[in-house]
Amino acid sequence: MFLHHLNNMNNRIKLKMLRRISVLLICTVIISALTGCGSKNYSYGLSPDDPVEVVIWLTGSEKRSGAYEEMIKLFNETEGKNRGIVVSSVSFGGDDKLSEEYIKDKEAGNDNLLPDMIEVSASNSLLYDSGIQYVDMNNLIADNTKQSIYENLLNAGSYGRDKQLRLLPVVKDTTVMAVDLTRWNDFKKQKEHYLNELDIWEGLDVVGETFYNTTGKSLYGLSSISQYMLVGSRQLGTGILSIENGKPVIRADGDVMKTLWQNYYGAFIRGGMYSYSKDKVEDLQSGRITIAAINSSETERLSTSTATEGDAFYLNEYQIIPYPQFKGMKKICPVDNTGVAILNKDDKKNIGCMLFLEWLLQDENNMHLACSAGGVPVNNRVSNPDYFEEYLDNNKTGMSSMDVSTMRISLEMMSDAEIYAAPMCDIYNDLTDYLDDTMSKAAHEDRNVVDDKEGIGIGRQEAIDKYVSDEHFGVWINEFRSGIQF
């Protein structure tokens, strides 16, 4: 009897111990979850009674800067107020203007006037200025926030052999194709072609040549040749730019470059493509081209645009379609190379900046920022069509019908493709300038020669054949390779 009673006591003691252990484990899990919601070290004296003030310089378009400013106001009224962080902003309207301001301050000896954060592209020379110390955000960002961002975009914002996270992706533009349906449908009545043929570069080239031969005008234009080449080469298997051991490596694979050349230079010579100005939206609105590859944030400009046809005005009707892919290759969704960098000031300011950026990357906040900026979210939990439709049903976004259409196409592109931005490196700006110029310059010059020959009675196809031959490509690729001196 005594032994039986003793065993019962032991069992009760064991049960109490197990309950205590369970409570401790639950508390540990809760604490871990709570600390995972913010940066790895988020105290540093932050207090609502003595808020830290941080400044961000914005370089994006008016639309994107306005979206950031809206989110800053909301943050200051909510999360920032509770945490003890006040964010303010200065908008510059472009990377170049920001750089000019920095140089002016530096020459005046006002280094202390530099902000705490800068929103810039990977081509901005300030990111590689040895006189500026940047925060490696790998040491600050919360694990759950980092895991919510596309790995390719984190890699694109990492710099050096030790892969410092210097440029944090927050919101991106992707590239879409905008179609003037009025002109397209006029062409379709004459030649039976469909928009889905334009999903691949090879189809765009074929339809473009037919369009030129039918209408005497070029069908389409691209906003960025360097993006076409960087993204296209990645898709075709050997990217022009890669980072190896922290250093940029440039490769110009013959087969890859031949495909890129055929579908840009060749399309240019045959008539399907042309570039009238840097502003492809303007080219589209003016009727110079019928289809334009443009940034997703630019499509809003098409919502209420008109164009001239002779002496008459008419209202354009536009449709957004996906950015083309190369036939038979794994899909890639191109996004811009922008992000936010934190300048290393002190622990309190650094953590204040990081907490603000993490707040922007939270699910609903990141989607709201993308909707306002005309871009796409970088949070992989929300960058899909289903989440957007639910968000659209439950929130007042203020988006135009063109904005909504663009977002739908952009998210469809993201949902079944590799999300790609070229990696940051100190030669990025020189390389993109070179890529934008080298093929375009040759295409313009040779297209003019072909047009001149046709004008004096030489058959157009006869004139074209010389320029799209293997021999001519061989001359071009040798010149291209010899010009890469970075």
Image (cartoon, grey):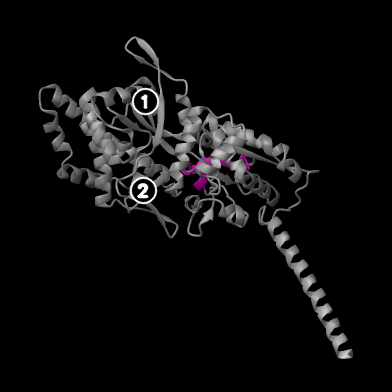
Provide the secondary structure element on which disc 1 rests.
strand
Crowding around mark 1 (Cα neighbors within 10 Å: few <14, some 14 to 19, many 20+) is many
Q: Amino acid at mark 1?
A: Asp
Q: Is residue 170 left or right of residue 222?
A: right
Callout 1 touching callout 2 (CB < 8 Å) = no
- Residue at left 59%, top 35%? 393
Q: Amino acid at mark 2?
A: Phe
What is the x, y in percent for residue 241? 37, 50
Which quadrant is home to the N terminus? bottom right
Q: Is residue 418 left or right of residue 354?
A: left
Q: Which residue is mark 2?
A: 486
**Residue 288: in sight, yes or no?**
no
What is the x, y in percent for residue 108? 59, 36
- What residue span does the magenta drawing correspond to? 114-129
**Which of the two discs, 1 and 2, sits closer to the camera?**
1
Quarter of the image where one finds residue 392: top right
Crowding around mark 2 (Cα neighbors within 10 Å: few <14, some 14 to 19, many 20+) is few
What is the x, y in percent for residue 335? 45, 42
- Residue at left 24%, top 51%? 254
**Which mark sits nearer the N-terminus, 1 or 2?**
1
